[in-house]
Amino acid sequence: MNKMIPALLSLACAASLAAGADDSLVKFKGGIGVIPVSSATGTAPTSALANRNIVRGVQPSGQPWVIEDLRADVSATGHVAVDGRALLIAGGNLVATNANARVFATVVCEASAPFVERSTDLGGVALDASGDFRIDDVLVPAPVDCASPVLLIRNAANGTWFAAGIVKR
C-alpha cells in the first residue's frame, strides 16, 4: 500500500502541471460572416444613407460572406491557432467561391477607442477551394489582457473583415 503513495503523488503532480499548462487567454467557437451594411435610412426603394458594418474600427468587405465553422485559441503569449471552414462569398458574380482570397486574423481587446489591432502575418493564408483555412501564428503586438475580445478574419488584400469569431464562455 505504501508503494502506491509516491505513484499517486506523481500522478497528482502531473495532472496539476497539465491543468496549469493551458495558457489560453480567450477561445472562440463558431463564426459569423460579414453583412457589409448594418442599416440604411430613407424611404425610397434605394437608401439615401447606408451605415457600414464597421467593427472596432475595421471596415467590412464590400460583399456579404458566410462561414460554416470557426474555432480559435489565443494564448497569453500571443500565439493564435485558427481553424476556419467554408468561408465563402455570399453575393455578386463570385457567389459561393473563395474569391481567391487570402486571410489573416486580428484580435481587438478594447471595448472602446482607441483600439489596438493585434494581427497575424498581414500576408495571410490562402483559402482553399472550399473556403477552408488554418492560421498558426503569433499576434503582434501580443495581448496582455483581453477584457472585451473580438476576433476578425480579414482580407489580406485590403484589410476588410470577412468573418468574426464567437467568444466561447
Image (cartoon, helix red, strand yellow):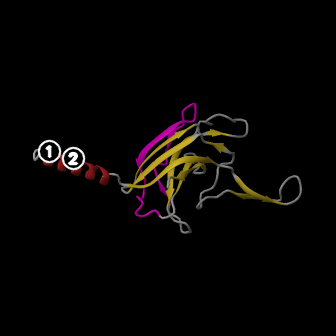
Query: What amino acid does circle 2 point to?
Result: Leu
Question: Going 55% across and 66% down the picture, which residue do you hit?
Answer: 111
Give residue 131's quadrant in the image.
Answer: top right
Residue 144 painted magenta? yes
Q: Position of residue 75 (x, y in %)?
A: 39, 53
Q: Secondary structure at mark 1?
A: helix
**Neighbourhood count class around disc 1 (C-alpha, 10 Å): few under 14, some 14–19, many 20 upward:** few
Point out the residue furthest to the front here. 1
Q: Nearer the viewer, residue 13 or 105?
A: 13
Judging by the rendered image, the residue that carries numbered circle 2 is: 11
Name the mark nearer the viewer: 2 or 1: 1
Q: Amino acid at mark 1?
A: Met
> Residue 91, position in %: x, y?
72, 40
Asked whether, in this view, residue 149 is left or right of residue 55, the answer is: left
In this picture, residue 18 sits left or right of residue 144:
left
Q: Which residue was labeled with disc 1? A: 4
Q: Which label sits on residue 152?
A: none
